[in-house]
Image (cartoon, rainbow, N blue to C red):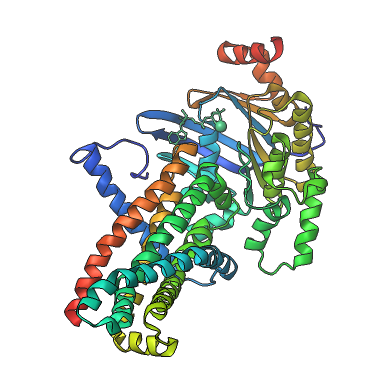
């Protein structure tokens, strides 16, 4: 578990979700979600495939709109913001995609520089170069700077994707399955990266994962999701010592197999 | 909270007709947003110039070849009829009228619909289905401004230029053919050719190619921007962009010709 010296401000919610519903046609994906993310906290969201984890964080960043319920991020109601205000809020929230979603037509350098160039028109070329290399060092991939996404491995793409969101210095990070499809060693590296991101960049994060090792390593609290709602929220030990029903089967699958 | 999402409302008439009108409504909104974002500064010069290069410069070879061949073939095919009446001297002006009024706007537009429309459709669709457009959104970048506005304007600006270039090359092709048979000089040829073309002809041609360029840009960007169904959707978007662009171009041709003929 993360070292206890990291301070979590329990009185300060950076994300606050109340009674959130979302369906696609007849398919009810989210059914009344309540969730708080505290400042400085890493929260892992666990759950089977298709339970609506990606939909949840896409609603948080305003890529999808909820049917009902409220999502408040850094004190702002996401759904009621104008488009320019929403973009201003998105500067403070990093989102790393399950699919990495790197720009195919750009090199790693350009991928990282693009959000900076678009959002800080006043930044000089030299400052941008410097920021890119700082972030590449932080994610441990300085040698890939002139490569195209097609030339990178899955794990490298994931890390560049995280780097591209870090470059705007977000206060909140949303990671969508940072370790899925990766070998255990690369997964461990990514877990360490997520932990070090909080130390270096002072972020609060939601980490979506299937992977209990990841949850145990990076998270202060875990929330287990099934059928569009949370069936357990608490510290890793609280949730998995109770060991009931789905939580138990999740645990058994990950640690006994 | 917001009624457009989720919660399946009962289709008004049948699902098909309903979604047909929904499509129109979406395209209407798309164009409205396009105008709203296009007039708001700052202009994305870098990406605009890049797109002009992609649209204009890279179509130049194709436009040159087809323009030249059109000129030669049209001249060759008109000669027997004209010589029957002993008026082969009319060849230059006949070709010029045909090229400027009808052939160049259509040929340039159809070539761009095929070449540029499909590539814009496929490019934006692949960015959409691999979440690259969403990635721009979450990095606080407005993908509509960056991707759509620049492409539509580039297309609207470049097609008229390509069209006039195509017309010029068509006349050159005709000149080579006429020169080989009737030994006309270049100056005499163009003198003869362009005396018959009025200001209204140029205006019609310009109007047509502006409208066609805008059509190709909007159709292919719309198809790409709203692609679904993974990689399957990429091919579909490219294909539908071309088909719908070409179809609309012919309909617009009829309408524009009617409007300008009523002025004439
Ligand atoms: N844009 C969409 N249109 C229609 N249905 C959708 C859409 N996005 C997601 N869904 C549906 O919502 C459900 C939840 O999807 P989601 O991507 O959130 O799952 P997930 O929990 O992230 O799963 P995984 O672990 O496999 O990524 C799925 O059944 C999916 O079919
Ligand atoms: Mg997912």
Residue A89, percent from left and from top: 58, 54
Residue B73's image quarter?
Answer: bottom left
Query: Residue at the location (35% across, 51% down)?
Result: B243
Q: Would you say A87 lies left or right of B65 here?
A: right
**Can the viewer see residue A62?**
no
Q: Judge whether B189 appears above or below A56 on screen.
A: below
**Quadrant in which the C terminus of chain A appears:** top right
Which is more toward the observer, B116 or B153? Answer: B116
Residue A190's image quarter?
Answer: top right
Residue B237, percent from left and from top: 42, 46
**Quadrant in which the N terminus of chain A appears:** top right
Counting every numbered tag in the picture gives 0
Residue A199, percent from left and from top: 79, 42
Query: Residue at the location (73% across, 54% down)?
Result: A109
Q: Would you say B153 lies left or right of A134 here?
A: left
Which is more toward the observer, B248 or B2? Answer: B248
Which is more toward the observer, B95 or B35? Answer: B95
Residue B147, percent from left and from top: 51, 58
Q: Judge whether B71 appears above or below A235 on screen.
A: below
Query: Residue at the location (41% across, 72% down)?
Result: B163
Which is more toward the observer, B215 or A45? Answer: B215
């Amino acid at each position: 578990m993360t070292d206890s010296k990291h301070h979590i401000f329990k009185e300060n919610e950076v994300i606050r979700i109340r009674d959130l519903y979302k369906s696609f046609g007849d398919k009810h994906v989210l059914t009344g979600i309540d969730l708080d993310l505290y400042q400085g906290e890493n929260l892992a969201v666990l759950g089977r495939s298709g339970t609506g984890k990606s939909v949840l964080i896409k609603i948080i960043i305003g890529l999808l709109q909820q049917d009902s319920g409220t999502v408040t991020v850094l004190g702002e109601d996401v759904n009621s913001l104008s488009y320019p205000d929403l973009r201003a809020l998105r500067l403070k929230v990093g989102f790393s995609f399950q699919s990495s979603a790197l720009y195919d037509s750009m090199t790693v350098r350009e991928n990282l520089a693009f959000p900076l160039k678009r959002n800080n028109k006043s930044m000089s070329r030299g400052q941008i170069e410097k920021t890119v290399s700082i972030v590449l060092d932080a994610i441990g991939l300085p040698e890939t700077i002139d490569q195209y996404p097609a030339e990178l491995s899955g794990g490298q793409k994931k890390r560049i994707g995280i780097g591209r969101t870090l470059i705007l210095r977000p206060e909140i990070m949303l990671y969508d399955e940072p370790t899925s499809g990766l070998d255990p060693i690369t997964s461990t590296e990514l877990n360490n990266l997520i932990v070090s991101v909080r130390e270096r960049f002072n972020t609060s994060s939601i980490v979506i994962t299937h992977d209990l090792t990841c949850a145990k390593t990076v998270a202060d609290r875990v929330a287990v999701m099934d059928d569009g709602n949370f069936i357990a929220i608490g510290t890793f030990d609280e949730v998995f010592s109770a060991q009931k029903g789905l939580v138990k089967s999740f645990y058994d699958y990950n640690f006994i197999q | 909270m917001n009624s457009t999402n989720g919660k399946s409302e009962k289709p008004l008439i049948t699902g098909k007709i309903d979604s047909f009108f929904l499509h129109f409504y979406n395209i209407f909104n798309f164009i409205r947003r396009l105008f709203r974002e296009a007039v708001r500064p700052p202009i994305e010069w870098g990406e605009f110039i890049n797109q002009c290069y992609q649209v204009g410069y890279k179509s130049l070879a194709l436009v040159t070849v087809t323009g030249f061949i059109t000129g030669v073939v049209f001249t060759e095919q008109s000669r027997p009829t004209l010589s029957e009446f002993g008026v082969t001297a009319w060849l230059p002006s006949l070709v010029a009228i045909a090229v400027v009024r009808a052939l160049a706007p259509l040929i340039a537009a159809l070539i761009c619909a095929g070449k540029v429309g499909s590539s814009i459709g496929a490019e934006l669709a692949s960015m959409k289905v691999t979440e690259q457009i969403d990635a721009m959104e979450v990095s606080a970048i407005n993908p509509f401004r960056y991707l759509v506005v620049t492409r539509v304007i580039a297309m609207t600006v470049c097609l008229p230029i390509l069209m006039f270039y195509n017309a010029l090359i068509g006349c050159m092709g005709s000149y080579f053919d006429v020169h080989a048979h009737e030994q006309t000089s270049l100056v005499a040829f163009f003198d003869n050719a362009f005396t018959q073309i009025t200001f209204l002809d140029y205006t019609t041609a310009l109007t047509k190619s502006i409208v066609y360029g805008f059509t190709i840009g909007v159709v292919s960007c719309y198809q790409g921007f709203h692609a679904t169904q993974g990689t399957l959707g990429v091919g579909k978007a490219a294909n539908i962009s071309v088909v719908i662009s070409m179809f609309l171009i012919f309909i617009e041709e009829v309408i524009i010709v009617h409007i300008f003929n009523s002025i004439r």
